[in-house]
Amino acid sequence: MSELKLALEVPRWTWQCYTEHLGLVLGLSSVASIQRFIVVNWTAQVPHGAALASEVVVLAARIALVVSLWRIAMRGQALRLSAGRAFARNHWRGLLWQGAFLGAAYLAFEVLAEHALSRLLPEPARQTYLAILLFLKNPTVIALTFLWWIGVLRQAFRTTSESGTDTGRAAVRHSA
């Protein structure tokens, strides 16, 4: 199996897990979506204390999302540091592909969508654009990124009971 194919297993698994657990993802991500929409769109009207408290609630919702997704993804999995070391040694090119994929996503959704496109809009429309963009990014881009990182860790550190260490091949093929 080529390193590119190995690297592509993670986004495939990520998408499958995302769609299978869409209710959980949308439910917990909606906390951040609604908070960002309100706080960014009506910054001047939201008291500082309320904005700060809402950030704490968003942090709690994101932690709950990551912990929930981690538990789903790692159900029945055994992770070992030695497996991660072996994976990095044997599949470093696949890890470079993962970095390239995530870098491309960052470029598209952070640099282009959030910064470059907003500069093309008239000044009065920028705040509303950012509020809507963040509303949409929370249940999609951000949640998928969390899942993607979990998938990378799952692929790299997974072990099997038969041979002791699985160097990553087929590590993310099985549904969470």
Image (tube, rainbow, N blue to C red):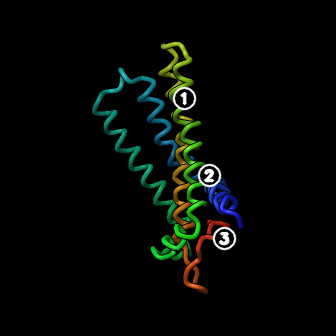
Name the one closer to the observer, 47 or 154: 154
Q: Earlier in the sequence, mark 2 or mark 1?
A: 2
Q: Which numbered marker is on residue 57?
A: none
123 lies left or right of 1: left
The image quadrant of residue 132 is top right
- What amino acid does circle 1 point to? Ile
Q: Residues within 10 Å of mark 3 (few under 14, many from 20)?
A: few
Residues at badges 2 and 1 in contact (C-beta under 8 Å)? no
Q: Which numbered marker is on residue 170?
A: 3
- What amino acid does circle 2 point to? Leu
Name the one closer to the observer, 109 or 103: 103
Q: Residues within 10 Å of mark 1 (few under 14, many from 20)?
A: some
Q: Secondary structure at mark 2?
A: helix
Q: CA distance from mark 2 to mark 1?
A: 20 Å
Where residue 1 appears, as percent x and y from the top left, is 71, 67
Q: Which numbered marker is on residue 22?
A: 2
Residue occupying image coordinates x 52% and y 67%: 88
Name the one closer to the observer, 116 or 75: 116
Image label count: 3
- What amino acid does circle 3 point to? Ala
Q: CA distance from mark 3 to mark 2?
A: 23 Å
Q: Which numbered marker is on residue 132?
A: 1
Where residue 40 appears, as percent x and y from the top left, is 43, 27
Where residue 38 appears, as percent x and y from the top left, is 44, 29
Q: Secondary structure at mark 1?
A: helix
Q: Earlier in the sequence, mark 3 or mark 2?
A: 2
